[in-house]
Image (tube, rainbow, N blue to C red):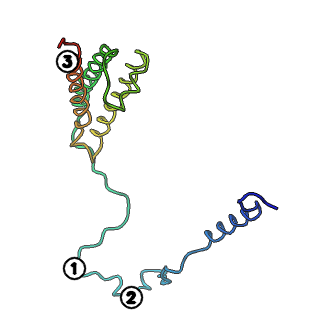
Amino acid sequence: MITSHEPPTAARFLGFVFVILVGALPAAAQQPTVKFTALADARPSDIYQPAEKPPQPTLGPRFVPPVREDHRRGVLLLAPLVYAGALLDMHQTRSELPHFHEDDPLARPFLKLPTPLFYTSGIAMETGVNLVGWKMARSPRWQRAWWMAQSAAIFAHFGAYAYTKAHARATLSPD
C-alpha cells in the first residue's frame, strides 16, 4: 500500500518520456506545402511587382547608423559632479547617523555597513551610473539622451544632501 500521494517513479518516468516524444513530433500541419525549386518555376504573377509599389524590405541585418557626435568630453565632465554629489550626500548622512532616520528603504541597509564599505558601495554605484552615461553616449539609439542618467544622479544627490542638512538642523534645533 502506497501512503504518499505521489505517482510511482515508473509512472513519472513514462509521463516524462511521453511529453518529450510528443514535443519532438514535427508540427507541419499549418505550413503550406508549396515549394518552388527555382524562380523560373514560379508563375509570372508571383514575381511581378508593379512600378507604383516600392519593393518590400527583406529580413536581414539591421542597419545601425554610426555614432555621429562624440560625447566623451561631456560624459567625462559630468562624472566628477556625480562623484562629488554622492560623496557630499554620503558624508552628510554618515555624520548625522546616530540621530538621523533614513526614509528611503533602498538606502537604509547601506547605513548599517562599516564606514569604508559604505563609501566604497556608494562610489561603486556611481561608477555604474557613469558607465550607463558612457554607454548611452556611444549608442546610436540613446546618443541624444546621454546626459540624462548622470544629470538625474547629480540632482538626486545634491537634493538628498540639502534634505539631510535641513532635516538634521530641524531635529537639532531647540524648540
Query: Label 3 to label 1, Cα distance in Å?
Result: 76 Å
Q: Is residue 26 above or below residue 150?
A: below
Check disc 1 and report the residue beneath it: 51
Quick check: 35 above or below 106? below
Residue at horizontal 79 percent and vertical 60 percent from the top: 2
Q: CA distance from mark 1 to mark 2?
A: 18 Å
Residue 74 position in % (x across, y down) = 21, 31
Q: For the residue labelled by badge 1, is the local secondary structure a helix, a strand or a loop? A: loop
Question: Which numbered disc flags the more N-terminal residue, 1 or 2?
Answer: 2
Horizontal and vertical percent for residue 40?
Answer: 42, 84
**Identity of the amino acid at label 1?**
Ala
Q: Which mark is residue 170?
A: 3
| Label 3 crowd bin: few (<14), some (14–19), many (20+), radius 10 Å | few
Looking at the rendered structure, the secondary structure element under dot 3 is helix
Name the residue type under label 3.
Ala
Q: Are marks 3 and 2 in contact (CB under 8 Å)?
A: no
Q: Is residue 76 above or below residue 54?
A: above
Secondary structure beneath disc 2?
Answer: loop
Mark closer to the chain start, 3 or 1: 1
Q: Residue at x 65, y 66 (%)?
A: 20
* Left or right, 79 with reference to 39: left
Looking at this rendering, what residue extends furthest in the left direction? 175
Badge 2 amino acid: Arg
Horizontally, residue 130 falls left or right of residue 25, namely left
Q: Tell me, yes or no, whether the two marked residues, 1 and 2, touch with CB atoms within 8 Å.
A: no
| Residue assigned mark 2 | 43
Q: Position of residue 80 (x, y in %)?
A: 26, 22
Please state, as top left, top right, bottom left or bottom right, where the C terminus lies in the image: top left
Query: Which of marks 2 and 3 precedes in the sequence?
Result: 2
> Could you tell me how many numbered marks the image carries?
3
The mark closer to the camera, 3 or 2, is 3
